[in-house]
Image (cartoon, rainbow, N blue to C red):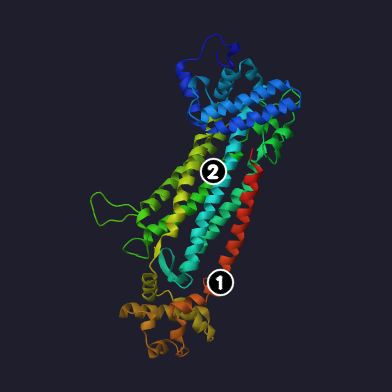
Amino acid sequence: MKLWGGRFTKPTNQLVDEYTASIYFDKKLAKYDIQGSIAHVGMLKACGIIPEADADTIAAGLAIVAKKINAGEAVLTAENEDIHMNVEKLLIEEIGAIGGKLHTGRSRNDQVALDMRLYLREAIIEIAQLIGTVQESLLNQAKSNLETVMPGYTHLQRAQPVLFGHHMMAYVFMFQRDVERLMDSFKRVNKSPLGAGALAGTTFPINRQLVAEKLGFFGISENSLDAVSDRDFVVEFLANASLISTHLSRLCEEIVQWSSAEFNFVELDDAFSTGSSMMPQKKNPDVAELVRGKTGRVYGHLMGMLTTLKGLPLAYNKDMQEDKEGMFDTVETLRGALALFAPMIETMQVKKEKMYAAVRKDFSNATDLADYLVGKGMPFRESHAVVGQVVLACINDKKYLLDMSLEEFQSYSNLVEADIFDVLTPEAVVNARNVAGGTAKNRVEEQITTAIAAMKENNNWIQLQTKAIQV
């Protein structure tokens, strides 16, 4: 007999058991289910809803069940459907009928919402911490490359020179936004739905706030219907995870390009590369490619969750069983990618000479020639046209701006003087961008200082929340 089987006259079909069971994946929630149950029974005891001795017996029994599950000694079955029913069945087997009092004043509907929030808040803290290690590796590359000049691109065409350190800092700030989004979402995850019951609350004189405090929540969900039907917190996490994956994927795309023979700007450490089964010369950036590839997997989970929710009436519906696998897989996907990414970036060899040579062989200093002429009094649109003619002539003559003589420059404008050769060097072009957020060395140093301060705040938040949710 199932724990809910009192009104049924025959057992469910075995195929129904197999199809509707969630124990195959929600067993990941065992730890959190037991944490929530211990807090719940403690509240039942404090409120005088069940006898003190029974509550103590149940709490002790739950601790034993937790140990058996952790040790792999407990048998979790599809017949018992989900982690909640499996834990309760194991508890009753351990301590007898008294274990049946555990479910007083709650439903699986508010119970599963609780477990998911307990799980996800830990995952958010862990992912924020892992992003911090990636930021640190990017920051170290930036510090080591404050004078490394590389081509900057728009439309994947050479645009203007930038410092490689500046390029790395762009990703530091992308990931900073990711951490800030996670921290902001945490306050919406960290609210207790327990006590909402199936949808309308409970007739027992429970103390929802006491359970919330025991579990380290900021507070309780305000509406019982919303508490059991809300999966916004899952959608928000998946959306945040999708942006994290986007940023990882963009950097992966650049690493794949930069490590090719056509760019030859970086080389990944052997520990983060693979070879070919056929071509012995190959060194493939497979880690970067796979992280890039798994981005679609994360996007898919977001779209799957949104699609599941879009037509559901209040309150709980069995469709919502589909809320967990995508969440679990997204956490695992991000955990793996971020853990690999930090050492891959940290050990990446930057080929400074190759980058500098590339900048010397393009027209990415053309804007500076135009700006030079504007500084001498020529209207920008006129200078733009003049420099376009100069570039065209250089292309026809198979040379670059710094290959031109002063006389050749002056044939296009007598405003050009000998100092033009200092203006057009890659170093001068980079350091001329001396505006807040620019690529000049001193401005990149400012960005590093700003990022370090932000990352310190992130770490303070991580430590605070880690301590607060310890149960």
The number of numbered discs placed on residues in the rendered structure image is 2
In the picture, which quadrant includes the C terminus? top right
Q: Secondary structure at mark 2?
A: helix
Looking at the rendered structure, the kind of residue marked 1 is Arg
The residue nearer to you, when weighing 85 against 471, is 471
Residue beneath the point at 49% across and 84% down: 373
Q: Which mark is residue 238?
A: 2
The residue nearer to you, when weighing 73 against 371, is 73
Q: Is residue 313 visible?
A: no
Q: Position of residue 39 (x, y in %)?
A: 67, 31
Q: Position of residue 440 (x, y in %)?
A: 52, 73
Callout 2–callout 1 Cβ contact below 8 Å = no
**Residue positioned most to the top:** 9
Q: Is residue 335 visible?
A: yes
Residue linked to disc 1: 443
Q: Position of residue 158 (x, y in %)?
A: 41, 69
In the picture, which quadrant includes the N terminus? top right
Residue beneath the point at 41% across and 48% down: 293
Q: Is residue 290 above or below residue 45?
A: below
Residue beneath the point at 55% across and 70% down: 445
Instruction: Classify 10 Å Cα crowding around label 2: few (below 14), some (14-19), many (20 and above).
Output: many
Looking at the rendered structure, the kind of residue marked 2 is Leu
